[in-house]
Amino acid sequence: MQSQAFIDRLMADISRHLPGDLGRLRQDVEHSVRAVLNETLTRLDLVSREEFEVQRQVLERTRAKLDALEKEVAALERAADEDRP
């Protein structure tokens, strides 16, 4: 899970900034921050970069097909207009 790796890196950064002499309070703060981060990331419903890239490519192909169909329809409409008396 990529979000877990992100949380681990963020927690390491946060932990470095907490005073070392807090003892149990330090552990409680780290636990609470980790829980809030997990909950927040879960609610964000994030996708991986790989999933995003796959969907981007699908969208590009779909747009290309749509452009081609629009041109074809325009050409057919012009041909139909020319055939009308």
Image (tube, rainbow, N blue to C red):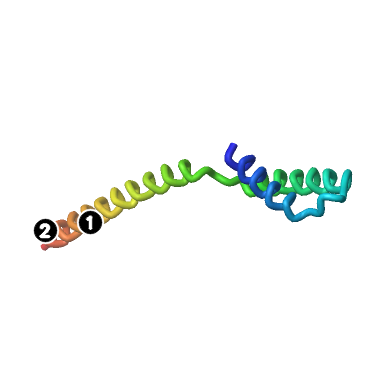
Residue at left offset 24%, top offset 52%? 68
Q: Are marks 1 and 2 in contact (CB under 8 Å)?
A: no
Q: Is residue 42 left or right of residue 46?
A: right
> Mark 2, residues whose alpha carbon is within 10 Å: few (<14), some, or many (≥20)?
few
Residue at left offset 28%, top offset 54%? 67
Q: Mark 2 belongs to which amino acid?
A: Asp
> Tag 2's secondary structure?
helix
Residue at left offset 16%, top offset 57%? 80
* Disc sitting over residue 83 in the figure: 2
Q: Is residue 1 left or right of residue 39?
A: left
Residue pointed to by mark 1 = 71
Residue 85 figure quarter:
bottom left
Nearer to me, 41 or 22? 22
> Tag 1's secondary structure?
helix
Nearer to me, 66 or 83? 66
Find the distance from the CA under tag 1 to the CA under tag 2.
18 Å
Looking at the image, which residue sits at the far top? 1
| For marks 1 and 2 on the same chain, the one whose residue lies earlier in the sequence | 1
The quadrant of the image that shows the N terminus is top right
Work out whether 65 lies above or below 4: below
The percent coordinates of residue 10 (x first, y second) are 66, 49
